Image (cartoon, coloured by chain):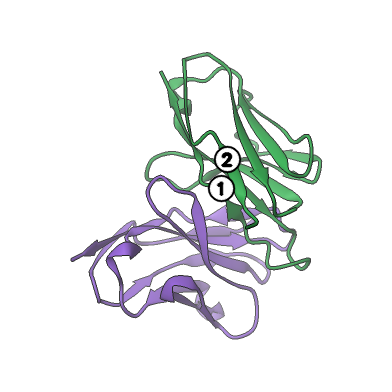
Amino acid sequence: DAMVIQNPRYQVTQFGKPVTLSCSQTLNHNVMYWYQQKSSQAPKLLFHYYDKDFNNEADTPDNFQSRRPNTSFCFLDIRSPGLGDAAMYLCATSRVPGTSGLGEQFFGPGTRLTVL
Amino acid sequence: AQSVTQPDIHITVSEGASLELRCNYSYGATPYLFWYVQSPGQGLQLLLKYFSGDTLVQGIKGFEAEFKRSQSSFNLRKPSVHWSDAAEYFCAVGATDGQNFVFGPGTRLSVLP
C-alpha cells in the first residue's frame, strides 16, 4: 500500500543533542510537510517542500532545519533540542490540486520526541 | 489567507447518539475543505473532502459533511456514534495553490457508553 512512513516512532534525546527525524513516502507526491504538534493542539506547520523548493514558515525557529534529498525522503533536523521542542512531529505529503485529488494531505503516524 | 474556526473545543455524546461538529472557514476564493480524525498518539486520517459538486459529502466510517457557502460552514455529522469514534477532529482549508493548508484548532470528541 502506498503510504507515508516515519522513523523512529519514538525518539528520546538529550537537551542540546542534535536529532534527525525521518520521513519517506511511496505516494510519489511532490509536496512534503513537517508539522509540530503539542498535546491537545492542532498541528503547526514548520515548513514544506514543493519538489525541491523549500518553504519555511515565518515563525519556525532556526533550530529546525530540513532536507529533501529526493522525492521519497524528507528529514527534520533539530540542531539543539530544548525542553520546549518535546512534541509529536508529523510528516505529510500531497499533490497540487487538480493533478489528482484536492490537495489533501496524507499523514504518517508521527514521531514522538522526548527531550531529557 | 484562509482561516478555520471550530467553536467546540470538547463535545461529549452517548454511544448511538447523533453527532455534529462545527467548522467555519474564511477564504476569498472557493475553498478546498477537509475533515481529519486523529486518535491518540496517531497521525491524522482523512475522513472526507470537498471542493465542488453536491454539497453533502460522504466520507469514511459513516461520516458526512455539508458545505454551506452562505454560512461559510462545513459541518461534520454522523447519525449514530460508536465508542471507537472518540478522537480529535480537525477541519482544514486548502488553497488553490495546493501548498497553503490551514487546520482548525480541533474538537475533542468523547463518547459515553
According to the image, label 1 marks what residue? A108
Going from N to C along the chain, the mark reached first, 1 or 2, is 2
Helix, strand, or loop for circle 1?
loop
**Few, some or many residues within 10 Å of mark 2 (<14, 14–19, 20+):** many
Residue at image position (62%, 64%) is B27
Q: Is residue B44 left or right of residue B99?
A: left
For badge 1, the amino acid type reads: Gly
Q: Residue at x 38, y 40 (%)?
A: A39
What chain is the purple one? B
Residue nearest the observer in this picture, A109 or B44: A109
- Whether B6 is drawn above or below A46: the answer is below
SS at badge 2:
strand
Instruction: Give residue A6's mark.
Output: 2
Q: Residue A116 in the image: x percent, y percent?
A: 40, 18
Q: Position of residue B83 (x, y in %)?
A: 27, 65
Identify the chain drawn in green. A
